[in-house]
Amino acid sequence: MFCGFLKICFPIGMPFHFRILCIFIGINLLRIDLHGIKMKNLLKKTLIFFAFISLLTASFGQSNDAVQVETFSLDEEKNVVSISIKTTESFIVGANRYVLHIGGKHFLRNEHPEGRLDEIVFYISLDEYETLVDQGRIVLVYGYYHENTQQDGEGSQANGFTGKHWDLGLFTPQKFKTK
């Protein structure tokens, strides 16, 4: 019973706190099999444990107000626009990458300058930058999700983005002085 329960509870992409909950329930199911613990006590303990794990994982999340677009700059030699996004906290460090969505386009090339975790700089070719639509929605997403790249930058974005994301406002093109 216990092994079958664990196989059901671990599909790919299940959030960490749900996996912990499943392990906790599985262990308690094993205890029920061995010791005959009452189901009411198991449910009570499981709900308390799940609430604790949910609060713990929520506290490590980043607030939406902490992230904002800081600057736009042009590197004339490379013909690349840099978009600096800063946070008052730390950006999430993990196996996922950050993706910047502006209107219907997405951009992947980025770095944390000097390894600092309070800033991400995205690099966009000048040609791509010049095609961005004025007043397009700017959204930073932690993780590359294919369904996010299919959004057209207009009506379909009302449905939201998959994954942890921050809405950074509307895009206003900057005019750069060239030599």
Image (cartoon, rainbow, N blue to C red):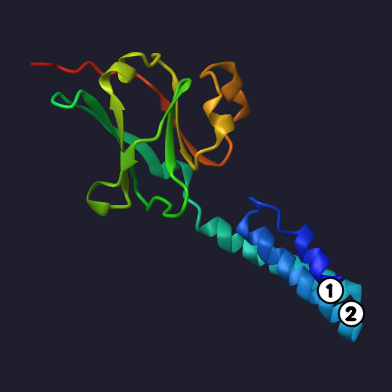
Quarter of image, res 86: top left
Q: Secondary structure at mark 2?
A: helix
Q: Position of residue 151 (x, y in %)?
A: 55, 23
Residue placed most toward the observer, 115 or 70: 115
Residue in view at x 27 percent, y 53 percent: 115
Residue placed most toward the observer, 26 or 175: 26
Q: Residues within 10 Å of mark 2 (few under 14, many from 20)?
A: few
On the image, numbered disc 1 is attached to which residue?
A: 29
Q: Secondary structure at mark 1?
A: helix
Residue in view at x 19 percent, y 18 percent: 176
Residue in view at x 56 percent, y 56 percent: 58
The tag on residue 33 is 2
Question: Which quadrant holds the C terminus?
Answer: top left
Looking at the picture, does residue 119 appear above or below residue 94?
Answer: above
Which residue ends up furthest to the bottom in the rendered image?
A: 35
Compared across the picture, whether 138 is left or right of 110 comes to right
Q: Position of residue 123 (x, y in %)?
A: 29, 32
The three-letter code of the residue at mark 1 reads Leu
Residue placed most toward the observer, 160 or 112: 112
Q: Residues within 10 Å of mark 1 (few under 14, many from 20)?
A: some
Q: Position of residue 165 (x, y in %)?
A: 50, 39
User: Visible in this render: residue 21?
Assistant: yes
Q: Position of residue 36 (x, y in %)?
A: 92, 82
Residue in view at x 50 percent, y 43 percent: 143
Compared across the picture, whether 169 is left or right of 57 comes to left
- In this rendering, the count of numbered labels is 2
CB-based contact (under 8 Å), mark 1 and mark 2: yes
The three-letter code of the residue at mark 2 reads Asp
